[in-house]
Amino acid sequence: MVAHVSTVAFLGLEARGVEVQVQLAAGLPAFVVVGLADKAVAESRERVRAALAAIGLALPPKRITVNLSPADLPKEGSHFDLPIALGVLGAMGVIDAETLGQYVAVGELGLDGRVLPAPGVLLAALHASERDLGLVCPAAQGPEAAWAGRVEVIAAPDLLALLNHFKGTAPLAAPRPGGAAEGEAGPDLAQVKGQETAKRALEIAAAGGHNLLMTGPPGAGKSLMAACMPGILPPLTPAEALEVSMVASVAGQLAGGRLVRRRPFRAPHHSASMAALTGGGLKARPGEVSLAHLGVLFLDELPEFQRAVLDSLRQPLETGRVTVARANAHVTFPARVQLVAAMNPCRCGHLGDPALACARAPRCAADYQARVSGPLLDRIDLHVEVAAVSAADLALPPAAEGSAAVAARVAAARAIQTARYEGEGARTNAEADGLLLDRVATPDVAGRALLAEAAAKMRLSARGYHRVLRVARTIADLAAVESVGRTHVAEALSYRRRAPVN
């Protein structure tokens, strides 16, 4: 007899259907798992054997063959334990095989028979909903699976409770969707003394989803202002929250089944590897740029990152997704992030200060800044110089305007963009491109003349030209102005990095 149980394999944020086929046949006792399974799946034999023994069942003295179909699709992860165990129980006649065919199962098994959490339950629930099937998952992840909507979720704490549910002796209650995790808002902009130009650039970046680079000496407030960014960004919409939560689910970071409502803020250390930043590794997990999807990726001490690691961000910043290539599969993760970076002007950080600057200036500054490639800098919309804070500035009282006032203006600008780009495939001005950008951001006559003159003098690339247009469109949105004018273009150009002159 062959029992069939449905489960999934994860390729990025795609859940591929997998059929677990279990056969009990005469022959020498053996337990074999085939179908391109990795080591974690192969080890499920021992976990299944121990879990069944924990509830008083022993494997029959037969040859047990488990096939994971399609056989050419890589199978990774411990979530195959539960479907394999259910398939064995179905083949043994303990559970009705036809009933098992109505569910998708995911979950890891403990040696004592408990059903333990596994990454990707939300994606599995969405996959089951699309196929009009139910879902069997760990009890701890029932609230996460319940967010999928139209799907019957059986959240089992252990194998014995699951058996009693299928036999009808002790049905399990349907889980309810978990709450929304708001997260921490971070510091308030009122804590930042001075730095009005940088705070203005931060507001523009938040309003349009633009990339921002702050350059200045140590202690000027760059990291503090970057940490204020979550407090001025609008909360995620329900659709965006589902996108972000899907990434967190695959990474195993969706705690308590609570969807993420605040935009992610990720700040990896400068020692991060390429796989840690962009994704990859042995099992192709999402990296920091994907975990920050629809949020902020903050890179402090930008030149201290390895150059190859920084250059790996070029494609995600341009396309909004990252593709990890493997010999047997290509895995794509979303990566529509807002890059906020901070750096010192030189290694000692005091370039331009006659009292503190080192004797190697300006060669020291040129060597240090050259560690960040020009193509990456060209993808950053706003470049702002952050001056040192004087003792007189520190003695001033807190700023009258805090994050709440700035967040209100940002929300109003984002509302304008949401209405403008409805049905256009973009969310913010930073995502507008091609004919759409020409239609919504073309300046008036005076603005076009200024932009043409500046593009020639500043030697703007085509990418830089379009990024100036996007920033100018955001500045106009903050002013609630329909058309882009000369003043908006002028302010956008003031934040543009000038190309070095040979």
Image (cartoon, rainbow, N blue to C red):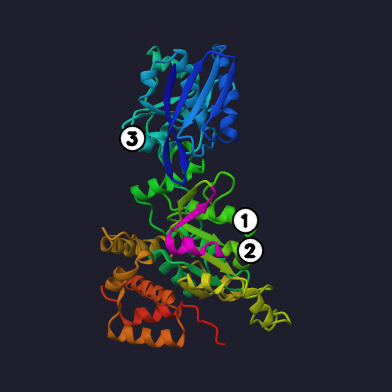
In the displayed structure, 486 sits above or below 343; it is below
Q: Which residue is mark 1?
A: 273
Q: Please report whichever mark, 2 or 3, sits nearer to the chain's N-terminal start.
A: 3
Check disc 3: other Cα within 10 Å, few if <14, some if 14-19, many if 20+. Answer: some
x and y, in percent, of residue 452 in the image: 37, 85
Q: State the residue at coordinates (55%, 27%).
A: 33
Q: For mark 2, what is the residue?
A: 306
Task: Determine whether the residue tagged by mark 1 lies in a helix, strand or loop.
Answer: loop
What segment is highlighted magenta in the picture?
311-327
Of residues 429 and 502, the one nearer the viewer is: 502
Q: Amino acid at mark 1?
A: Ser
Local SS, label 2 = loop
Residue beneath disc 3: 129
Q: Sequence-wise, which precedes: disc 2 or disc 1?
A: 1
Q: Is residue 72 left or right of residue 310?
A: left
| Res 181 visible | no
Mark 2 to mark 3: distance in Å? 43 Å
Q: Position of residue 357 (x, y in %)?
A: 69, 80
Question: Which residue is rendered at x = 57% and y = 36% of the image?
Answer: 38
**Label 1, label 3: how far apart the Cα atoms are:** 37 Å
- Mark 1 and mark 3 lie on one chain; the one further toward the N terminus is 3
Rendered-image quadrant of the N terminus: top left
Residue type, mark 2 in image: Gln
Q: Position of residue 453 (x, y in %)?
A: 39, 88
Q: Position of residue 95 (x, y in %)?
A: 42, 15
